[in-house]
Every structure is written in C-alpha cells, then in structure tokens.
Image (cartoon, grey):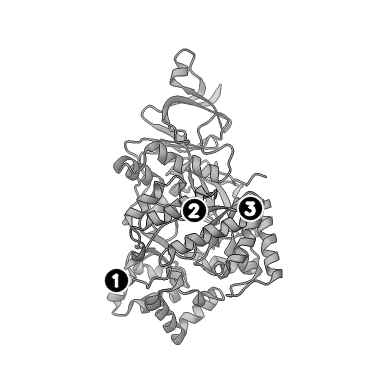
C-alpha cells in the first residue's frame, strides 16, 4: 500500500501543457504514480493507506518563491504560514546582496544592523554559523518550507573589503573569488547583488564580472538587484545583460520592474531588450511580484556616499547637521542613487515597520503625513525616525505602474517572486499574498495569464532556473511538493490595510510528501530542508 492517493484532481503539471484529470500517488516523499483518467478506465485504481478526494481542486507543483527575505524568519517562526499557506514549498534566500553568510563576527554584527528593516535585529536567533554550508546545515535542522541560498555579494565585499567606496585590491578580489567558490561548493545556487545597497554598490562591473565567472564555473546563476529601477533603469538592465554575457554566466533579474514616473508605460522597451539578448543565445530569466508598490528600508533611500563606512557611520552623518543637510539636498533635489536617481516624493513613502515600539505612530502613514501632523518638514521627520530607530524602519514605496506589471508577467522567461519582507506592523501584502494573488486576480479575474501558463511561471520555470532535477513538475519520481487549490475561490487575503491575512482557496500543501497545510490549517510538520546546488 502506498502512503497517499489524491483522487480525481485536475492536474496542472507545471509544464504549461493543458490540464488533465488524474489520481496522483505519493509514497516516501515522492510522486510514485500519475494515473490519468483515461488510463484508469480499464484497470484497478491505485490504493493507499490514505485517500484524499480532490474533486473540483487543481493539483499543481508547489510554488517556488524566487525572491524571498525569510533568511531569519524560517528560523524564528516554525509555523511560517506567511509562505506555507500560499502554497510556497521552496524559497530562494540570500537576496539583494546582503544576508548572514559568509560572515565573521565583525561583518555579522554589521549586516544584522544594516538589514534589520528586512529581517529584524535577530536578537532571538542563535547565530551559530559563519559559512554558507553551516547556514544550510542550520536550516536542515527543520524548517517549514524548503530553502535555497544565493551568496550575497555585498556581504562578501564587506568581509573582504569593508564598507568603503573604493576599488578592491588584487588580494581582496582573490579573497572574494575564494569566498564565492567556497559558498558554491557548500551548496549555494548562485550569487545575488544589491547594487543600490552598500557595500555591494561600490563594486565596479569588472569586479562583478570576475565573481560571476566563478559562479558560472559551478553552474550557478547571477541574480542582481541592479543599479536603478527609476531614472536609468533601461541602462541598468543593459549593464547586467552585458556583464553576464562577458562572464558567460546565467542571469536572473530580481524583481524586474519599471518604476517611478519616468518609466510609465516603458515595459515593452525592457522586454525588447531581453528578447534581443535571448535571441542571441543569452540565458536570462526574471521574477516579479504582482503589485505596484515596492518595499525596502528607509535608509536605502539615502545616497551611497552617506552609507559609506557602514551603519555606525551613517548614523554619525545623520546626527551632524551640516552633513544631514547635504543628504537632504541629494535626496530631495538631485535624486540619490539610493532612490534610483529620482528626487524623493515623501507622499509615496509609507512607513511599514519600526523596531522600537515607541515609534509605532509612524507606521501606516506616509512620511509627508507624519511630518504634517508634527508641523515639520518631511526630511526632519525622516531623519528623526532613522536616528531614533537606528536605521531599522521599513517602507512601502508607491511608485509602480499596473500596465508595466501586467506586461512583464506575460513574458516567457518570467517567474514569481514575492520579495516579501515579513518584518513590521504593516508589511507589504505581497509577503502573504503573492502566489494566490497571481492565481485569483491575474488568472481568474483578469485573464492576463491562463491557469496553465501561470502555474508554469510559478513552478516548472523557476525549478529549471535552479536546475532542480526532481521538483517543479508533477511527474513520477519527482519530490511530492504539491499544492491543491480551488481555482474558483483562490485569492490573497492580505491587503494593504490588513497585510497578514492568510489566503483562501488553498486547502492542502505537501512538502516532501508531508502535509504542512491540511484542510486549510497549518500542521506541526517541519518538512522543509536546505536545497543545495548539485555538482
């Protein structure tokens, strides 16, 4: 007898092919049989110790979140319903060039402070690792969903060079190459960059190319948050395409959006650029989230020169009146590189979270609104908040365009990524709603994608990018990472007003053959493991 047979499911198998009705058999963590209705008509149907009636439900591979910020959340929150309830069975961590391995004691403390707005300070975490392999081993002790890891180039640079805006010496570049090689050997699937975040943004293209050559030699991919999503966005995309071509490295463009007023309606220009590169033989994919606002930290809006030297240096500059005035001028008048070359509009910057509970009144309001209530300028409010919360505030940035979102998600190399920050009292709803929002809003309600196309974007295609030989499709012998959802009711529960509401219409989620969501409720299973790059 097998463990489980899921009867009469409408199988959307992740390949983009038309759906079909089948019984799907699971045993010992794998799919052992997929018996189509026509094949079952003249033979005995499979039997198992447990049967699940899937009449009216779609069975698909588990969703792969290609851009996740759950690096500490997976360790802090065993429940992790934010992702498990969406049908996410695998997250890719280490994004935007900043995460927690490889590190030493100095850089760990610096990184923890630099990205507290993404992941919290981590005071409740036992940081008992330093290398990439040790972090993956830590995940293997038991997590809610599977996780893969990208080597964060900014963290590597902090370890080898520091937080200064300067060219790496030959010895420092050699050390960065070794760190990247070690991370790949220990199981990372590629390397990420955050080229509007310090210290990764201080790397010139020649340095990045050398590191990408190392990544390519191990069969990994490069995942850049490139140098601009605003003014100069197309040039930034062109830069990454050229860099990956020079390094002969596969390229995955992180949260590939076209934001700010300067890019309204310009998604076709980006897609034309990608089509030309693909036609020339480039290996390129991208991910997006199905919303218009972005999300990051308030400190990320500052110019790169203000961030030089690390978190303590930033706070010292903000505390100095003359230097703070220079920062204000760059942010408000010139358009800082941290704000993608666009002068900041404070009415688009909404505070979504703070570390200090005493500052909770700022959450849910734009900086402009809070400034008006206090009778001060928006910069005065922003500066006060950055200093009081020690760079920890996270923000929503309302600068996107719906027509760009829809155009990019239709592209044949598109995949889904939540870019979900789980910190703060009012995080972006994409953290809790990205995947059901694709299925409910953009498939059922708007018809932007067919169901089969959308599932392929969220499962088979990202699995191919990660070079996973046994995930991302409903096939015999594949890992039993599967989702059962009702195509008539699946929807994101999360909203901007109530961002932590769980989705509807996803009654069952299995990871490695074990129910992590059953009858719509989280079980106590910790079925996830680290997914390591295969040699």
* Placement of 472 over or under 371, stated as above or below: above
The residues tagged by marks 2 and 1 sit, at their Cα atoms, a distance apart of 30 Å
Q: Nearer the viewer, residue 475 or 453?
A: 453
Q: Position of residue 3 (x, y in %)?
A: 54, 27
Specify which label sits upstream in the sequence, 3 or 2: 2
Mark 3 or mark 2, which is nearer to you?
Answer: 3
Query: For the residue labelled by badge 2, is the local secondary structure a helix, a strand or a loop?
Result: loop
Quick one: SS at disc 1? helix
Name the spot of residue 403 as percent of width and height, x first. 32, 53
Tell me residue 58's x, y (percent). 40, 32
* Crowd rating for badge 3 (residues with CA inside 10 Å; few <14, some 14–19, many 20+): many
Would residue 263 be seen by someone viewing this image from the given angle? yes
Residue 275 is marked as none
Numbered badge on residue 216: 3
Label 1 belongs to which residue?
A: 369
Q: How many labels does the image show?
A: 3
The image quadrant of residue 487 is top left
Q: Do the residues labelled 1 and 3 touch (CB within 8 Å)?
A: no
The correct choice, above or below, for 470 with respect to 253 in the image is: above
Instruction: Tell me if residue 131 can be seen.
Output: no
Q: Position of residue 63 (x, y in %)?
A: 47, 42
From mark 1 to mark 3, how far is it between C-alphas? 47 Å
Numbered badge on residue 68? 2
Mark 2, other Cα within 10 Å: few <14 / some 14–19 / many ≥20:
many
Disc 3/disc 2 C-alpha distance (Å): 22 Å
Q: In which quarter of the image is residue 191?
A: bottom right
Q: Residue at x 46, y 47 (%)?
A: 415
Tell me the crowding category of disc 1: few under 14, some 14 to 19, or many 20 or more residues within 10 angstroms, Cα based: some
Whether 437 is drawn above or below 157: the answer is above
């Amino acid at each position: 007898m097998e463990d489980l047979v899921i009867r009469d499911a409408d199988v959307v198998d992740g390949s983009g092919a038309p759906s079909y009705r089948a019984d799907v058999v699971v045993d010992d963590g794998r799919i052992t049989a997929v018996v189509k209705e026509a094949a079952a008509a003249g033979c005995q149907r499979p039997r198992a110790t447990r049967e699940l009636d899937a009449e009216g439900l779609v069975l698909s591979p588990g969703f792969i979140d290609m851009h996740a910020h759950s690096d500490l959340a997976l360790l802090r929150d065993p429940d992790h319903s934010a992702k498990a309830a969406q049908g996410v069975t695998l997250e890719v961590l280490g994004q935007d060039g900043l995460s927690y391995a490889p590190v030493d004691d100095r850089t760990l403390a610096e990184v923890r402070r630099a990205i507290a707005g993404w992941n919290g300070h981590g005071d409740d975490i036992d940081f008992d690792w330093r290398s990439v392999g040790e972090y993956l081993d830590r995940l293997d002790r038991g997590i809610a969903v599977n996780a893969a890891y990208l080597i964060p180039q900014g963290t590597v640079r902090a370890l080898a060079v520091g937080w200064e805006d300067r060219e790496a010496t030959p010895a420092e570049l050699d050390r960065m190459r070794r760190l990247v090689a070690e991370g790949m050997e220990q199981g990372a699937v590629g390397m990420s960059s955050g080229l509007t975040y310090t210290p990764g943004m201080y790397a010139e293209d020649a340095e990045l190319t050398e590191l990408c050559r190392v990544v390519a030699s191990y069969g990994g991919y490069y995942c850049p948050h490139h140098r601009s999503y605003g003014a100069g966005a197309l040039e930034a995309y062109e830069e990454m395409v050229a860099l990956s071509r020079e390094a002969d490295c596969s390229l995955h463009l992180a949260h590939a959006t076209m934001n700010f007023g300067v890019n309204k309606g310009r998604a076709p220009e980006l897609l034309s650029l990608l089509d030309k590169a693909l036609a020339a033989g480039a290996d390129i994919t991208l991910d997006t989230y199905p919303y218009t606002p972005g999300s990051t930290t308030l400190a990320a809006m500052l110019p790169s020169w203000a961030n030089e030297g690390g978190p303590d240096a930033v706070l010292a500059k903000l505390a100095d009146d003359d230097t703070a005035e220079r920062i204000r001028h760059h942010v408000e008048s010139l358009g800082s590189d941290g704000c993608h070359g666009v002068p900041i509009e404070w009415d688009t910057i909404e505070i979504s979270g703070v570390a200090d509970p005493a500052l909770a009144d700022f959450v849910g309001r734009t900086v402009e609104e809070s400034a008006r209530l206090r009778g001060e300028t928006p910069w005065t409010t922003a500066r006060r908040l950055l200093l009081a919360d020690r760079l920890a505030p996270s923000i929503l940035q309302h600068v996107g365009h719906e027509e760009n979102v829809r155009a990019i998600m239709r592209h044949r190399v598109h995949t889904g990524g939540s870019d979900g920050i789980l910190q703060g009292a009012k995080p972006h709803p994409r953290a809790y709603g990205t995947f059901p929002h694709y299925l409910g809003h953009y498939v059922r309600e708007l018809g932007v994608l067919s169901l089969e196309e959308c599932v392929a974007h969220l499962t088979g295609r990202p699995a191919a990018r990660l070079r996973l030989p046994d995930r991302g499709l409903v096939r015999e012998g594949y890992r039993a990472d599967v989702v059962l959802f009702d195509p008539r009711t699946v929807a994101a529960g999360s909203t901007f007003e109530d961002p932590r509401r769980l989705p509807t219409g996803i009654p069952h989620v299995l990871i490695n053959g074990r129910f992590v969501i059953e009858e719509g409720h989280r079980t106590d299973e910790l079925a996830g493991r680290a997914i390591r790059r295969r040699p």
